[in-house]
Amino acid sequence: MERVPIQLTVNGQSYQVEVEPRMLLVHCIRDVLNLTGTHIGCDTTSCGACTVLWNGRPVKSCTVFAVQADGGEILTVEGLERDGQLHPVQEGFWEEHGLQCGFCTPGMMMTAVALLQENADPSEEEIRKAISGNLCRCTGYVNIVKAIQYAARKMRETVPAAVGIAGGE
Amino acid sequence: MTTTPIRGLGHPVKRKEDPRFIRGKGTYVDDVKLPGMLYLDIVRSPYAHARIKRIDTSKALAMPGVVDVITGAELEKAGLAWMPTLMSDRQMVLPTERVVYYAQEVAAVVATDRYTAADAVLAVEVEYEPLTPVLDPFKALEPGAPLVRPDREQKTNHIWHWEAGDKEKTDRIFQEAEVVVSQDLYIPRIHVCSIETCGCVVNYDRAIDKLTIWMTSQAPHAHRTVFSLVSGIPEHKIRIISPDIGGGFGGKVPVYPGYVIATYAALKLGKPIKWIEDRSENLQADSFARDYHIHAELAATRDGKIRAMRVHTVADHGAFDAAANPSKFPAGLFSVCTGSYDMEAAHVAVDGVYTNKPPGGVAYRCSFRVTEAVHTIERMVDVLADELGMDPAEIRFKNFIRPEQFPYKSPTGWEYDSGNYPATLQKALDAIGYQELRREQAERRARGELMGIGISTFTEIVGAGPSHTFDILGIKMFDSAEIRVHPTGSAIVRIGVQTQGQGHETTFAQIVAEELGLPVENILVEHGDTDTAPYGLGTYASRSTPVAGAATAVAARKIREKARLIAAHLLEVSPDDLEWRDYAFRVKGSPDRFKTMQEIAFAAYTNFPLGLEGGLEAVCYYDPPNMTFPFGAYVCVVDIDRGTGQVKVREFLAVDDCGTIINPMIVEGQIHGGLTMGLAPALFEEIVYDDNGTMLTGTFMDYLLPTAVETPHWKTDKTVTPSPHHPLGAKGVGESPTIGAPPAIVNAVVDALSHLGVRHIDIPITPAKLYQLLVEKGVAE
């Protein structure tokens, strides 16, 4: 099948790749760019394991064509850590036992990052609503909520710029 | 001497596996990518029962990028059209004549990429002659029912009959009993839905004649043995690597046809092959659980003392008996259904039946039918309480096995190791404010509101198992650990079980830290690679801590005994003059003269006594003397919306007793997750087929996993009653909440409606089902 050249900025790095027009963004990220931290857990846009930030907004990358994202900025789990410093959301998931098998974790964390960008002090109910598009089969969500609360606290205490999430710098 | 804290048993050590997961650096099977790798995809049946008249692969083969199409006819020539199941039945890898369930594997295509493979699946033309399917196990047992398995000698859909307990004594008590209650309970078919589906990457390296399979496996050693037996390839030439696994819950215990086809393709084509299921394939064709049609009865005195229990169950196993039960237990450990209650007798009978559905009764965070057993007894106790007008807490206190009765011999032959049921229930009732809740319920009921309080006081049975009774395909259910202490006092531990999220890399390090007095940071746990890990039966049925955890403790103690000899040599005293205290060997009476394990480890390589072998390592293959019996008391409070039939779990308190706790943070996490997998079948999940046997719930759009919005904020607490026979006193916890939660939730919903004459509701209690009931009872809004 015919391939189309596209340009993506992923975790601040620019990539020029050729993809089939039907290729899903998640397959482009995983199989073409070899960033396998973004996972696939379903085929109906239900589970959220593939969540990435596309121009700062969380999307399920199994439901975006790679060509749609042409010229866009993507942030994946691999881009959260900066200069050897874990993102507060990563830290929160580790501190609060917010993960078990780790498979839903990258998508869950990306959704959490997006939530905390918009709402620096979310209530438990707001957190639960925000992550309701991300399925976790292991944790029962209680510690995921705590992990996000931990990150929110930490981010409020830190200089805001230190935890910016812009794709490119 | 080290100043780093040891952080052994009881410490909430942050998980060692997490740094890679939170960075997106885990290695799951689909992350494995080899040069020249091809992708395999599977053609599946649109019929539940059909004769295959013709398979035309020519159009698919003509597509650019398609390398091969594999059918049953080809596998048959290689002797691989069928494979053994773990229950000594056999299962089609690819069919040669007929398909026996919807979404069954029919053919496989191999192509240069995923997309081409998916296109080629659509290009394989299969002509079917539909046959009448049989979907109801009761109809399957009727004379003249369509035969699901004509390949078998016995021309019947009946697979086996199994019994436990004393029928005569039980029947006698029922005849003379003052009160008898009976109830039909159906526990529907459900699916584990680990967020990672199943798959494998297979590579055959001709140069070294070695087959390596990265596989979503909860039991890599057992799978290696099965692969060797089926293929004839010597076992040392097969390496199974179970890398990071995205959740198991039993769904990754069976061998699926896809693994076998991918292996065949890799050997045939000489190229690495990747096969990864879609979610719909996973949800439609892999490892279902439950599907138990239960008829249960209790005999009791008028004042509420249970005397006997009688249960008959029809178990729908689908088209192949591919459950993962121990050989002697075709109905798993269902006979533990007398639960936490002392009674004179019990009799349990189960009949396994074939139907035109994928293999059933396999696993859902409880492989061995304990969930079914607990659901039965915990519901029946409430049914009896309702009959007698007793409070559900009161009837439980009246019938509990008393603490002084342990070890307790159950009427179906189990020996419960330890327990203190009244204390655990009392703790739960006090913490939740039971009496106050009952008062609130009465007030609300007077206002027409529907509020219910449900109790479940379950006994779990885990740690399979003692070799005299437990085996899978003849392989005894021991488990293993191998510990090697390095000269500078760090260690590597290799275990025969395999984490899928339970945190083995942390808890098993804590066991070794505790036993050897080495800091937990300095202990590396490896597992999942059959070339390096000692042989084990894998992680499922909550067996890791009871069996491999014990093996790890015993191996560490072997090391300690050798270390004692080295310490004696270093301190120039007799080994008998030393005692192990505060993580060091100390001279009795002069505790300031001591050697730490770090010092001893260095000496084990540099300065060991003459006549002693150098090095410091040990292996243990642990054969547990008995099962362990974790237990708990759960209380659930629900409010029912009369306008929608929706159940809102307002509060849920789980008091668990899993014996000695290794890492309280991990145990709590296991309980949260287990409770959620108990909530799911109680209120949401059910696999549904139409009359043709087509699955109606084959995607996440129709099969509802609870999200963070439906899941309550679980509250947990504990009591600690150590197992007397486990080296650490630990019992295992992963499945307890999944078996304990559903009856607590159902009991709460039924309790909310008991004044309307409702005594039982089958799960899942969906809004539609409950609203219908509210309409019938005249209380819908």
Image: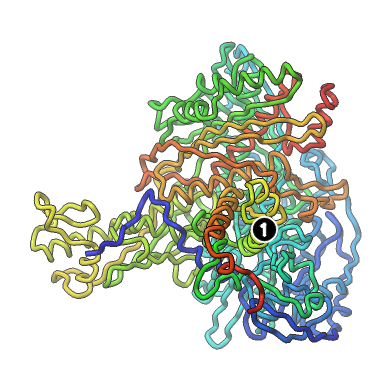
* Amino acid type, mark 1: Leu
Q: Nearer the viewer, residue B662 or A9?
A: A9
**Residue at the spot of label 1:** A115
Disc 1: host chain: A
Is residue B79 at all visible to an observer of this figure? yes
Q: Position of residue B262 (x, y in %)?
A: 68, 73
- The quarter of the rendered structure image containing the C terminus of chain B is top right
> In the image, B80: left or right of B205?
right
Q: Is residue B513 above or below residue A34?
A: above
Q: Position of residue B26 (x, y in %)?
A: 56, 69
Secondary structure at badge 1 equals helix
Q: Which residue extends farthest bottom?
A: B207
Q: Residue at x 28, y 58 (%)?
A: B517
Badge 1: residue crowd in 10 Å (few <14, some 14–19, many ≥20): many
Q: Nearer the viewer, residue B199 or B235?
A: B199
Q: Residue at x 63, y 24 (%)?
A: B382
Q: Residue at x 34, y 48 (%)?
A: B727
> In the image, A72: left or right of B160?
right
Q: Position of residue B516 (x, y in %)?
A: 29, 58
